[in-house]
Amino acid sequence: MARRNLRACLNGFARKVDECKRLAIDAHAWATPKPGIKRAMVSVQRRDSMIELAFLRSFLAWETFLEESFVLYLSGQKPPKGRPPSRYAFPPNLGVAMEWVIPEGQDYATWTVATRVTERAQRFFRNGQPYAPVLRSNQTALDESRTLRNAIAHASASAQSKFQTLVRNKLGAFPPKLTVGGFLGMVVPGSAPPISFLDHYLQKVEFAAEQMVPV
């Protein structure tokens, strides 16, 4: 990260999300039979697995963006546009900044839970800027994204139960044998223009990242 800056951090995140979107588009195309061909290139099950991979990679990119941008701000870097946040701590370099954000007694800092990132931002920056306001305003979408991420990454009953509850809240019922990938490929009810759940959640994190690092 020594050669990184906030613009590169944001651009790198945007590229990774774009790659995930293209993977999902390819998955849909490969699972759709072409004229004159009886079988598609991949099955629906494999399509859903590819969409899940795309979403999981985008969520990991989001976590990486949060960590990198946080440490860069803490080290005193300025965003491409606007003023940097007021710091409560002044680490001498990036290495020390990365160490300071790790909670006492833990080996590393986690960036999965938005509320924890908000609390961390409030410890290091005045009013938790630029993280706390953005994370709070996108709390629901980020929590739902984490639910989907956990349902992909973990087969536990708890993770699957939370996924089913999310689907029921969005669709009114849980379709039989619905996978996370299948849900992400569905159109958000009432969306105009129509947008898939995958694109809906990716747009949310992209917008949040652009607010945190204005260009």
Image (spheres, helix red, strand yellow):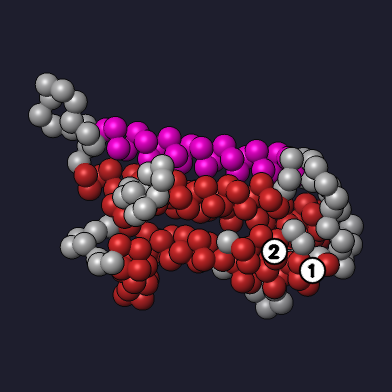
Q: Nearer the viewer, residue 65 or 109?
A: 65
Q: Is residue 24 magenta?
A: yes
Q: Is residue 11 magenta?
A: yes
Q: CA distance from mark 1 to mark 2?
A: 8 Å
Q: Which residue is mark 1?
A: 127
Residue type, numbered disc 1: Asn
- Residue at the far bottom in the pictured view: 105
Q: Look at 48% across and 37% down and name the residue there.
A: 19
Q: Which residue is mark 2?
A: 133
Q: Nearer the viewer, residue 29 or 65?
A: 29
Residue type, numbered disc 2: Pro
Q: Which residues are magenta?
A: 5-30
User: Mark 1 near mark 2, Cβ–Cβ under 8 Å?
Assistant: yes
Q: Secondary structure at mark 1?
A: helix
Most prominent secondary structure in the magenta stretch?
Answer: helix
> Where residue 77 appears, x then y in whole percent?
84, 49
Q: Secondary structure at mark 2?
A: helix
